[in-house]
Every structure is written in structure tokens, then in C-alpha cells.
Amino acid sequence: MPQKPLKYLHDTDPWMLAEDIPDMDPFFAQVWQSCFVNEFIKPSGVRYQKLVSIFRGYHLWFYYGHEDSNRVGEHIASQNPFKVYRRF
């Protein structure tokens, strides 16, 4: 079966360390990391385009794209989308 190439691994947006968590359950981390790139657009109006995780045992490092992270942060800071989303 042919493998699908990774879409954002080698794009021009450099990776930036988002979190270094020394004791994280990989199955639990998948829930909120998946939310950042898939569901975060619903409450905030913007989502992260890419996220990569590295686990060694239970030690987690996860990375966002540098420009991608800046874009999301600027949108949240300028729009404050969570104040109008009543479920928060």
C-alpha cells in the first residue's frame, strides 16, 4: 500500500517548540493536539495548520510552525474570539 506523503513536514514555515512536557500520556495528548489542528477553528475562528509531536517514553515535545503560531496568536489577541463564544 503506498504511503501518503507528510503534507507540512518540509514546508517553508520553520518548526518552533510549543511545549516540553516531561510526563505526558500520549493517548491523552492526542486528544487536545488533534483539537488544535481540527476543531480549534470553531471557538476561535482560526486553527493551527500543522503540529508535530515527539515522544520518548512519556516525555513529550510538540512543535508548531513559527509563522503559523504567530498567525493564530495575533488573531486571538486582536479579535478576542472567545468572549462571543458562549460555551466558554
Image (cartoon, rainbow, N blue to C red):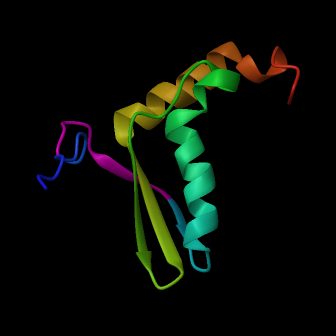
- Residue that appears at 61% across and 74% down: 24
Is 39 rendered above or below residue 61?
Answer: above
Whether residue 14 appears in magenta in the rendering, the answer is: yes
> With 48 as the anchor, is 52 left or right in this view?
left
Location of residue 42 in the rendering, given as x and y in whole percent from the top left corner = 65, 23
- Residue that appears at 61% across and 54% down: 31
In the image, 85 versus 6, the foreground residue is 6
Quadrant (top left, top right, bottom left, bottom right) of the N terminus: bottom left
* Residue at the far bottom in the pictured view: 57
In the image, 78 versus 62, the foreground residue is 62
In the image, 56 versus 34, the foreground residue is 34
Residue 14: image quadrant is: top left
Location of residue 33 in the rendering, given as x and y in whole percent from the top left corner = 55, 51
Image: magenta residue range = 10-18
Location of residue 86 in the rendering, given as x and y in whole percent from the top left corner = 88, 20
> With 75 as the anchor, is 82 left or right in this view?
right
Location of residue 83 in the rendering, given as x and y in whole percent from the top left corner = 83, 19
> With 1 as the anchor, is 76 left or right in this view?
right
- Residue that appears at 59% across and 24% down: 41
Is 46 rendered above or below residue 24?
Answer: above
Quadrant (top left, top right, bottom left, bottom right) of the C terminus: top right
Residue 12: image quadrant is: top left
Whether residue 79 appears in magenta in the rendering, the answer is: no
In the image, 87 versus 13, the foreground residue is 87
* Residue at the far left in the pictured view: 2
Is 42 rendered above or below residue 32?
Answer: above
